[in-house]
Each structure stands twice: as structure tokens, then as C-alpha cells.
Image (cartoon, grey):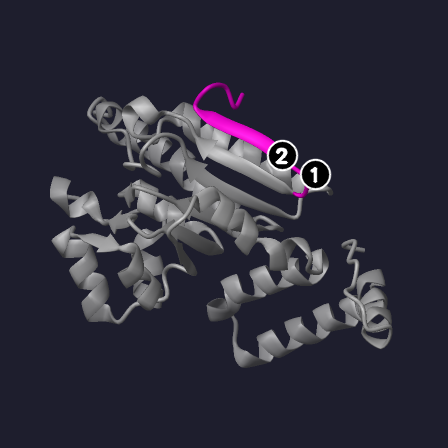
């Protein structure tokens, strides 16, 4: 059950998932991990939902792994089980058929950083910060963060962010391509506004764009060409394509239905 560790609501075509342990700085518990995944899957199965926005309750996005819980994991089996459940959040976001936007305020540290940048897009409040706090307790980034930073930053910058553990401002993360939009206003409102191009866009095409981009580094050029051709053949027969063409000639905005 989603229970109390995760807040979940739907407003029109957007699903909002919020980590709800403000008294623990939204530290990642097993209950939260399970509720997070359950909410993501519910949003994916709801045809009325076009996109998902994830956030944190209280003063920050998330402080990362729950050190009180981690301190009790005294053998490899327990550690692996905790890691597996936490990693399922990242994997579900990555493979979801719908775009996910993270709305970050305060700071996203450790696993909170991992969750924030696992989203397809990141909207951050101007005073937000991203912190690779792992090395502060003698470990390395996990939940996909090490690869995410390695893939998207020059190696010297990735190593600096990881090994210094210094707070990276929203502005710096924006200029490094980790954040899509920085706002001085309410970050949830800014994320919902940012979602406009998704909400009004073609769901089928967006689904394939997400998966093609996420897996592009796994394919050869030839395999990619075949994937593009197969998907394009499918989309050119869709109702959305016909609607898009008709709207173009009628000089109006298309009304895509994901069919």
C-alpha cells in the first residue's frame, strides 16, 4: 500500500507523487519505496494521465537513504533487499511509458539526488541544491546516479561532484544540463506549467521518444535505424498522426488522444 510515506493525487492529466516523511527529511524507507513504485504503476495504467510530477513534502526534496534503517542492515542479504527495493523506483521511472518530471526544492541529497535526476526532466527552485553525499559516509553513488553523472558530465566534473560531496546549486546544475528549468516561484506550479508540452503533445510518440533516447547507447546505428523505421511505420498509421496532419492544414492545435 502507498500508506502514509507517499502522497498521491491526480489533477486533470497530471499525477502528483510526493515523498511524505518530512520529519525524516523524506529519507527513503522501504515503505516509501514500495508506495512510490505502486503510484508510478497506477499512473502508467491510467489513460487519462499524460505525465507524472514527483516531489517532496516539507522543506526539502529528499535527504536520500534512511541512515537509521541502513545502520540496522548488518548482512549482505538485508542490504541487497533494501537496495533492490530502492532501485525499483529508478527502474520504474526509467521504463515508465510516460514522462516523469521531478520538482526539486531545498536539496536533493544522496539517493534523493538519484531519484531527482532519474526523471526525464528536472525543474528546480532557484535555491535548491544537489548533493552527492555518499562519499561523506564512505560509499559511492548508487541507484543509477554514478552512470547518470558519468554520461552527462565531463569526467573531471563528475568526479568532483561525487568525491567532494559539495552542494551543487540549481543554477550550476542547469548550466551543466542536469536541470531543465530553474524557477523563483512555487516549484510544483512551475513543474505543472513546464509539463504543458507533454500534456498537449502526442502520448504515443512521446512514449517511443523516451524509450529510444533512454536506450540509444545500447544499440548500434543499424539497430537504431531499424527501431526508428519500425516505430515510424506504426505511428504513421495512428489516429494521432492523422489528427496532427489535419490540424496542420486547418491551422489549429492538434487534439492528440494517444491512439
Image quadrant assignment for residue 52: top right
Say whether residue 176 is visible: no
Residue 5 locus on image (x, y percent): 43, 23
Q: As drawn, is 120 to the left or to the right of 229?
A: left
Q: Earlier in the sequence, mark 1 or mark 2?
A: 2
- Considering only vertical position in the picture, is 34 above or below 180? above
**Gap in angstroms between the C-alphas marked 1 and 2:** 10 Å
The answer to which of 95 and 22 lies nearer the viewer is 22
Q: Are marks 1 and 2 in contact (CB under 8 Å)?
A: yes
Q: Foreground: 141 or 238? A: 238
Q: Position of residue 74 (x, y in %)?
A: 21, 25
As drawn, which residue projects farthest toward the front? Answer: 185
Name the residue: 53% across, 55% down: 194
Q: Quadrant of residue 64?
A: top left
Assign a secondary structure to mark 1. loop
Rendered residue at 64%/57% (across/down) = 207
Give yes or no for residue 12 being in the magenta stretch: yes
Identify the element where label 2 is drawn: strand
The C terminus sits in image quarter: bottom right
Q: Is residue 120 visible?
A: yes
Rendered location of residue 245, percent (x, y):
83, 73
Q: Give the percent coordinates (x, y) of residue 152.
A: 35, 66
Q: Residue at x 35, y 43 (%)?
A: 105
Q: Which residues are magenta?
A: 1-13
Q: 14 and 206: which one is in front?
A: 14
Which residue lies under the disc numbered 2?
Answer: 10
Q: Quadrant of the N terminus?
A: top right
**Circle 1 sits on which residue?**
46
Number of marks: 2
Q: Is residue 49 left or right of residue 179?
A: right
Q: Residue drawn 41% across and 26% down?
A: 20
Amino acid at each position: 500500500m502507498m500508506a502514509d510515506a507517499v502522497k498521491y493525487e491526480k489533477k486533470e492529466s497530471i499525477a502528483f507523487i510526493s515523498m511524505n516523511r518530512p520529519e525524516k527529511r523524506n529519507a527513503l524507507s522501504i515503505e516509501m519505496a514500495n508506495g512510490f513504485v505502486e503510484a508510478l504503476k497506477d499512473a502508467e495504467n491510467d489513460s487519462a494521465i499524460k505525465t507524472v510530477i514527483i516531489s517532496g513534502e516539507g522543506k526539502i526534496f529528499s535527504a536520500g537513504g534512511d541512515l537509521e534503517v541502513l545502520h540496522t542492515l548488518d548482512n549482505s542479504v538485508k542490504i541487497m533487499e533494501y537496495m533492490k527495493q530502492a532501485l525499483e523506483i529508478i527502474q520504474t521511472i526509467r521504463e515508465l511509458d510516460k514522462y516523469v518530471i521531478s520538482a526539486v526544492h531545498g536539496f536533493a541529497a544522496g539517493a534523493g539526488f538519484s531519484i531527482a535526476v532519474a526523471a526525464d526532466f528536472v525543474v528546480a527552485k532557484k535555491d535548491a541544491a544537489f548533493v552527492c553525499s555518499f562519499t561523506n559516509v564512505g560509499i559511492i553513488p548508487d541507484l543509477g546516479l554514478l552512470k547518470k553523472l558519468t554520461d552527462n558530465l565531463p569526467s573531471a566534473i563528475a568526479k568532483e561532484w561525487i568525491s567532494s560531496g559539495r552542494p551543487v546549486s540549481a543554477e550550476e546544475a542547469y548550466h551543466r544540463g542536469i536541470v531543465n528549468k530553474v524557477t523563483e516561484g512555487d516549484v510544483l506550479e512551475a513543474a505543472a506549467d513546464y509539463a504543458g508540452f507533454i500534456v498537449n503533445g502526442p502520448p504515443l510518440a512521446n512514449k517511443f521518444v523516451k524509450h529510444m533516447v533512454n536506450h540509444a547507447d545500447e544499440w548500434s546505428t543499424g539497430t537504431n535505424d531499424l527501431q526508428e523505421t519500425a516505430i515510424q511505420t506504426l505511428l504513421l498509421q495512428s489516429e494521432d498522426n492523422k489528427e496532427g496532419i489535419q490540424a496542420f492544414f486547418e491551422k489549429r492545435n492538434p487534439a492528440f488522444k494517444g491512439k
